[in-house]
Amino acid sequence: MPPIPFRLSEFNHLSGRRPGPFMTAASLVMPGVRRVQRQVEPFARWWIESNEHALDAAEQGAKLWVALGDSMTLGSGASEPLSGFVGQILARHPGWACINLAIYGGRIADLRDRAMPALASLPTPDKVSMLVGSNDLMKPGLRAVAAGELARLLEEVPVGTVVGNQPGTYGAAIALNTVIDAAVASGRVRLADLRDPRARSWGRSTLAADHFHPNDAGYRGIADIFDEALFPGAGRSGPPSPEADRAVPVTEQRS
């Protein structure tokens, strides 16, 4: 019996896992955390509908970009889905369609198990991006296997995929970056280097209400870095972020 065709509309942007104890407790006392968590399902629904339009456009000849990732790729913390880094990049490149296969709370294994089959069902994309790993760094058991999981995933993504690394400078983040750097050196993937100050430094006005995810301004720095890697030579849109001079270093990875 032939396999049942994958339906893009069946792709689930939600991980199926409940928030951890820290985030659950924080949501009880911090309105900003609750506000961002309440975005998750509306943002997921928005991307489900947008993805169907993008698939139609790609089938009619539009150039296709597929974005893989976790809550950052979904745009959590932004004022609206298109104000995350994916939406900001898309707005700079008319004529492109984007299918967003981000999973809120997604881990490396989620991308391998769920996003990669979805990607395989699509028309061959012109560009693919990926940003994942920060959720794997939050628990010791996951950190222990994250580098190996990521190495396997990097062997499965299409050649030329633009991969974002970890801006954190602690050991587990460096271990993931070492795996990514090796894949970049081999020529298999390309790097969107989030060790750049535009992603490693944050000002008070670049964080969302939960003080964890970026807001629109914070996503702009990430958009600039991914844009330069995805569309080299296309030029950067707009002036530098006005918060850059007031930014402070990040001490923990945001996901």
Image (cartoon, rainbow, N blue to C red):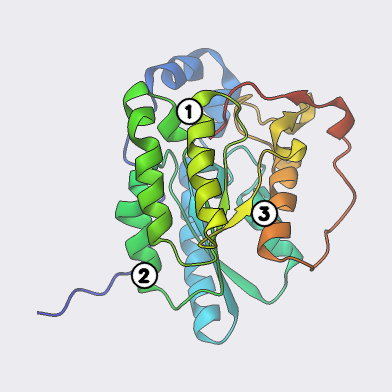
Write down the quadrant of residue 160 in the picture: bottom right
Q: Report the side of 138 relative to 249 (left or right).
A: left
Amino acid tagged 3: Phe
Mark 3 secondary-structure assignment = helix
Which residue matches tag 3?
Answer: 226
Which residue matches tag 2?
Answer: 120
Which residue matches tag 1?
Answer: 172
Amino acid tagged 1: Ala
Write down the quadrant of residue 89 in the picture: bottom right
| Mark sitting earlier along the chain (1/2) | 2
Q: How far apart are marks 3 and 1 (CA)?
A: 22 Å
Mark 1 secondary-structure assignment = helix
Q: Is residue 14 visible?
A: no
User: Where residue 26 appears, x then y in whole percent?
Assistant: 50, 16
| Vertical placement of residue 103 versus 101, above or below | above
Quadrant of the snapshot with the N terminus: bottom left
The mark found on residue 51 in the picture is: none
